[in-house]
């Protein structure tokens, strides 16, 4: 599960059980990423609320662009958990091949994305890996590509949310999800960019 104790949905009671029950109304399972917060139900609630506005269609960017940021940032931050989860999810949703998914992660600038999405990912990676190098010219370029200030804020929100999750997953030793068995082995291996899961 992880290097710290977590509480599964079967073991949960009180406030944690109530939170899990609400989550299970919209999902078939409680991801291990969410279970990392189980020792602090108040944190789990905040994380769930944050995910609704920072990811999963909660920004002005739309779900597809959020997922592009999530996947590419996770891959470049060497988070195997997030890379496998989102690369595998992308394969299921879009039917993309392992080669196409690896190309998107490693070479998004030449993966058939439009200029707007490439500019968005360039900025997101800069925010994720070297935020002190961001300057006003980065914002100007995004505006020239058609992003308004709310969308630029949402790029940063989604990116920094993913940075936090990748760091939690890696620092607390989260392991593989059961559903990953349905992801082709070559894709799981290609997305194992950090610790082997």
Image: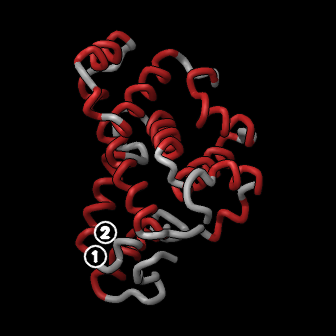
* Residue 108 in picture, x, y percent from top left: 57, 28
Residue 96 occupies quadrant: top right
Q: Secondary structure at mark 1?
A: helix
* Residue 138 in picture, x, y percent from top left: 31, 19
- The reply to whether callout 2 and callout 1 are in contact (CB within 8 Å) is yes
Which residue in the rendered view is the most extreme toward the top? Answer: 144
In the displayed structure, 61 sits above or below 35; it is above
Q: Could you say which disc has been placed on residue 15 in the image?
A: none
In the displayed structure, 32 sits above or below 92; it is below
Q: Nearer the viewer, residue 132 or 105?
A: 132
Count of numbered badges drawn on the protein: 2
- Report crowding for label 1: few under 14, some 14 to 19, many 20 or more residues within 10 A (C-alpha): some
* Residue 104 in picture, x, y percent from top left: 61, 33
Q: Which residue shows up at 39% across the image and 72% down it?
A: 36
In the displayed structure, 142 sits above or below 60; it is above
Q: Which residue shows up at 45% across the image and 61% down it?
A: 170
Residue 130 occupies quadrant: top left
- Residue 142 as seen in the image, left or right of residue 72: left
- Between the C-alphas of marks 2 and 1, the distance is 5 Å
In the displayed structure, 159 sits above or below 44; it is above
- Residue 5 as seen in the image, left or right of residue 177: left
Q: Which residue shows up at 36% across the image and 41% down it?
A: 159
- Residue 29 as seen in the image, left or right of residue 186: left
Q: Which residue shows up at 57% across the image and 55% down it?
A: 85
Residue 143 occupies quadrant: top left
* Residue 195 in picture, x, y percent from top left: 56, 61
Which residue is disc 2 drawn over?
A: 44
- Report crowding for label 2: few under 14, some 14 to 19, many 20 or more residues within 10 A (C-alpha): some
Which residue is disc 1 drawn over?
A: 41
């Amino acid at each position: 599960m992880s290097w710290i104790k977590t509480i599964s949905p079967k073991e949960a009671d009180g406030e944690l059980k109530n939170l899990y029950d609400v989550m299970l109304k919209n999902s078939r399972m409680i991801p291990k990423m969410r279970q990392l917060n189980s020792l602090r139900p108040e944190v789990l609630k905040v994380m769930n609320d944050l995910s609704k506005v920072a990811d999963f269609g909660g920004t002005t960017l739309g779900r597809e662009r959020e997922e592009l940021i999530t996947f590419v940032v996770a891959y470049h931050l060497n988070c195997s958990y997030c890379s496998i989860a989102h690369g595998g999810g992308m394969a299921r949703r879009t039917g993309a091949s392992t080669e196409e998914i690896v190309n998107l992660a490693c070479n998004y600038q030449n993966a058939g994305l439009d200029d707007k999405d490439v500019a968005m990912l360039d900025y997101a990676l800069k925010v994720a890996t070297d935020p002190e190098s961001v300057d006003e010219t980065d914002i100007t370029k995004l505006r020239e590509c058609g992003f308004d200030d709310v969308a630029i804020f949402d790029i940063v929100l989604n990116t920094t949310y993913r940075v936090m999750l990748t760091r939690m997953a890696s620092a607390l030793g989260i392991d593989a999800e059961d559903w990953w068995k349905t992801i082709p082995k070559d894709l799981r291996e290609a997305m194992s960019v950090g610790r082997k899961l």
